Amino acid sequence: MTGTDPNDNDPRLSRRALLAGAAGLAGLAVAACAGPDRPRAAATGRPLASPTTSSPASPSASPAADPAAVKANELGVIPVMMYHRITPTVAGEFDMTPKDFRAQLQRLFHEGYRPVRTIDLARGEMNVAAGYTPVVLTFDDGYADQFRMSGGQLDPECAVAIILDVAKEFPDCAPAGSFNINNDPFGLSTATARATGLRTLHELGFEIANHTFGHDNLGRLDSAGVQRDFVQLQRLVREAVPEASVLTMALPFGVEPANRALASRGTWQGDDYTNEAVLLVGANPSTSPFSPTFAPAAIPRIRGTSWHGGTAAFTGTYWLDYLSRHRSRRYVSAGNPGHVTVPRALAGQVAPRFRDRLVTY
Ligand SMILES: [Zn+2]
């Protein structure tokens, strides 16, 4: 989508999001996600962490860290941040300036969060080093100010460039995020431009995800229309980057189809799709994928921006403050992939299907 954010003008979203925001602010009404296995996309594209400066207080880079020493808790909550436009001119509740976006990332990384993609959360494969908390960075609508290249160089003010730049300041911080796109991603209006642009994004390690082809209100489409919307976007991505798999989605306007199952899987004209995660619009941190309450078809997101027209206090700040005050509620990685590490007292709260991976201390 280019131009005006369709979300801005949708009264249903505003009301819904406001309510969700209020509910979220009232307490940690956690919703959820789940799943197993790494996408092909990740194997090829993801750059390794490049440790440099400024280490947060406690995390350890060692993959064999003592879980007690880092207070590992892989049942804790995980923030899934939602962003739209990253623009110097804030015109609404979904906009954020590059400066403020950079500052929010710096705070996140400084406070021990490390970026992952939606699919990593959905599959419980958040490969962050011991002591760190995963954060999912998600971007909707494919605005050009999220990802813009000129003369083979990234625009330093676009979201991707800012993520890459800020990640370099922190140890064990591999750039990652998920871009939920529509039929005109990042203003790449020709097939050639899409192929070059989306391939670059993919190879940088970012997830290209489904936000439907037409950015439609799925509640108003019939079943065939819903499935067409997902398949057409999937085809657009496959045409541009054949090896990329579209594996997760964000609901336009936060509205589900009448047949909710079609948000997760379906088929149209011989093409199947599977969305292993479905992202909502509000309003609190996600539960851990190892919790029985994790619901991959309804993963809540935190607005990075302000819902007071874009200019007042950021909702992201509220939740980062909350998780700073209630640090024990955060997911803290043991840096032990393939296992689920929790304090002994929490062992009984791990979802039964993950108990064979359980490590306690
Ligand atoms: Zn949208």
Image (cartoon, rainbow, N blue to C red):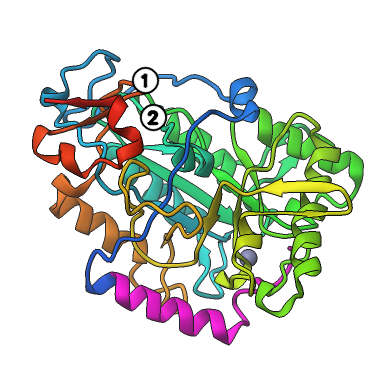
**Residue range corresponding to the magenta coloring:** 1-24
Task: From the viewer's perspective, tell me whether residue 314 is left or right of residue 281.
Answer: left
> In the drawing, what numbered circle is on residue 52?
1
What crowding class fits label 1: few (fewer than 14 Cα within 10 Å), some (14-19), or many (20 or more)? few
Q: Amino acid at mark 2?
A: Glu
Q: Amino acid at mark 1?
A: Thr
Q: CA distance from mark 2 to mark 1?
A: 6 Å
Vertical position of residue 234 compared to residue 49: above or below: below
In the rendered structure, are the residues bearing label 2 and label 1 in contact, judged by CB atoms less than 8 Å apart?
A: yes
Number of numbered markers: 2
Task: From the viewer's perspective, tell me whether residue 253 is left or right of residue 288.
Answer: right
Task: From the viewer's perspective, tell me whether residue 61 is left or right of residue 241.
Answer: left
Q: Nearer the viewer, residue 5 or 10?
A: 10
Q: Position of residue 29 (x, y in %)?
A: 28, 66
Q: Nearer the viewer, residue 105 or 10?
A: 10
Q: Position of residue 143 (x, y in %)?
A: 68, 57
Q: Position of residue 303 (x, y in %)?
A: 43, 63
What crowding class fits label 2: few (fewer than 14 Cα within 10 Å), some (14-19), or many (20 or more)? some
